[in-house]
Image (cartoon, coloured by chain):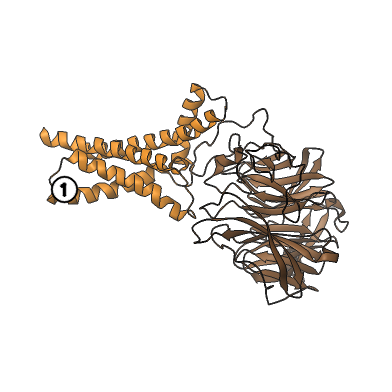
Chain colours: A orange, B brown
Amino acid sequence: MITNSANLILSILIATCLVILQETMSNIFWLISIDMPVSLGTFISTYFSNLYAMNLSGAVPLIALIGIGFLIAYLVTKIILIWVNVPRSYAYALAGAAAVLAIVLLMPLAFYNLDILAGGRSTLGKSILTFFGLISGYYFGKTLDKQRAS
Amino acid sequence: MIKKLLSFISLILISFISYSGEQEYKYEIIAENLSHPWGIALIDEDDILFTELSGQLRIIEKGVLNPEPINGVPEVLFAGQGGLSGIILDPNFNSNNKIYIAFSSPDDGRKTNTLEVISATLSSGSLEEVKTIFKASPSRKTAAHYGARMAFLDDGTLLITSGDGFNYREEAQYLDNHFGKIIRINTDGSVPLDNPFVANEQAKPEIWSYGHRNLQGIVVVDGVVYENEHGPMGGDELNIAESSRNYGWPAITYGKDYSGATISPFTKKKGMEQPIKYWVPSIAPSGMAYYEGSAFPGWTNSLFISALVPGDVRRLEISGSQVTNEEILFSDLGRIRDIVASPDGSLILATDGPKGKLVRVINK
C-alpha cells in the first residue's frame, strides 16, 4: 500500500515535471526563433522557476490538477483490469495519456475556451503532453507489474 | 444624545462625499441596470452614446436614458470578452453625425470570429449607412483579447486597437496579421499611404505599431498617443505608442502566464519599447481619458485609467515620458470599464457587469 502510494505520487511528479518541461521548451524555443538571447542558464533557471510557479502561484496548481486526473484515470483502469487481462504497464500508460489529454482538452472549457497551458495550444503540443502522460502512467503500471512478479 | 445624532449625521455625509487630496467629489448616477456597459462617447455633457457588450447601442438624451436601444447595430458575438465594444464620434460629428463602433463579429458558421469596425450615421434612433471599414485578419477561435478601442490622430486618421486573441500571442511579433497591433486607417477604410509598413509586401498595410497584448485604452493628447494594455498575470502597461515601433509582447514582458509559467524571462531588448509605467500585480486597465477640465483644478492635465482589478481609477500625472505621480480614486464603485472626461469638467465612469451603471463624478 505504502509502495503503491509512493509510486502513484512519483508518477504524478514525473508527469508534472514533464508537462512543465514542455511548457518551458515551447516558450523558450519560440524566443530562440526570434533571436532572443536565450542561454542554457536562461533555460534552466526558467524551468526551475516554472516548477515552482506553476505549482504554487498559477491560477490552478498543476500538480493538483494532474493528481486528480491521474487518480480518476488509475481508478477506472484498476476496475477495468478486473475483467481485462493486459499488462498493467500498458493499461496505466493509456490511463496516464488519457488523463493528461483530458486536462489539456477540458481546461479551456473552464476558461472561456482559452488554452491556459500555452504549450498545449497546437496539435503537436497536445501530442507531446499526452505522450508525457503515457510515460508517467507506464512507470506506474510497470512498478505494479514488478510487485506482482516478485 | 445630540452628540450621537451629530456623529450619525456626519457618518451619513461621509458616505456620500469622498475626498481625493484637495479634490472633493461626489457621484451622480446617470443610468443603471445596464447590460455590461463598455464604451462611452460623449455628444455633449448631457447626451451620451454608449455600448453594451451584449449588443445594444444606447443613448442618454438630455440626461435621460432612452429605454429603446438604437436600431441598425450589426450582429455581434457576445461571448467571453466579446461583444459590442468601443465607440467613438467622428471629429466632425456635429455636421455629419458619423460614429465608429468596434465589436467582435461572428464569421459564417460562428466557429470563428474577428474584430470588426463599422462607420455609420446616427439618425433619429437608428444607424444608417453602416459600412465595415476594418476587419482583423485572420479570424480567431477564441472570444478574448479584442482590444477594440479607438482614437483619432490629429490628421483625421483612425487608430484601432487590435488584441492578440489570447491563444495567438506570438503573432503580435509578426507583421502578416492583425493580432496585437495598433491599426491606422482612413475613416472610409482605406489605408493611409504613409503607414509605416505599406512598402513591406509581407506586412498588413493597416499596421501602425505592433508587439501589443490586449489594448484596452487609447487617447491622443497633443499628438502623443497613450495606450494601456492588459499584461498576463502582472505586467499591465501604459505606453506612448509611436508609428512602426515594436512594444515587445510576448518577447519581453513584466508578467507571467496565468498558469504561473514564464512567458519570457526577458523584460528588455534593443528595438523593443519599454512602457512608461507597468503594474505588478495587475490592475486590469480598461478605458482611458485625459482630463483638461477645470471643475477639479487639482486633476487638470492628468491621465485617468479605469481599472477592473480590484476596481478603481488611476490618476496619473505625466511629465514628458515619465509618470510622476499615481493616485487611486473611486475604489468604492467596483470594476470600472470605461472613463471619459465631459466638457462640463465632470468625469463619467462605466461600471462593469450585467448590472452596470454610468456614474458622473462631480465637484462637491
Q: Quadrant of residue B134?
A: bottom right
Q: Residues within 10 Å of mark 1 (few under 14, many from 20)?
A: some
Residue B345: where, in percent of width, then height?
Answer: 85, 60
In the rendered structure, the residue with mark 1 lies on which chain? A
- Image point (62%, 39%), residue name: B175
* Quarter in which the C terminus of chain B is drawn: bottom right
* Picture layout, residue A41 above or below residue B249: above
Tell whether B17 sits left or right of B103.
right
- Image point (15%, 33%), residue name: A146
- Image point (65%, 55%), residue name: B311
Residue B340: where, in percent of width, then height?
Answer: 76, 58
Q: Determine if residue B88 is in view.
A: yes
Q: Amino acid at mark 1?
A: Leu
Q: Which residue is mark 1?
A: A81
Q: Residue furthest top?
A: A40
- Image point (73%, 39%), residue name: B196
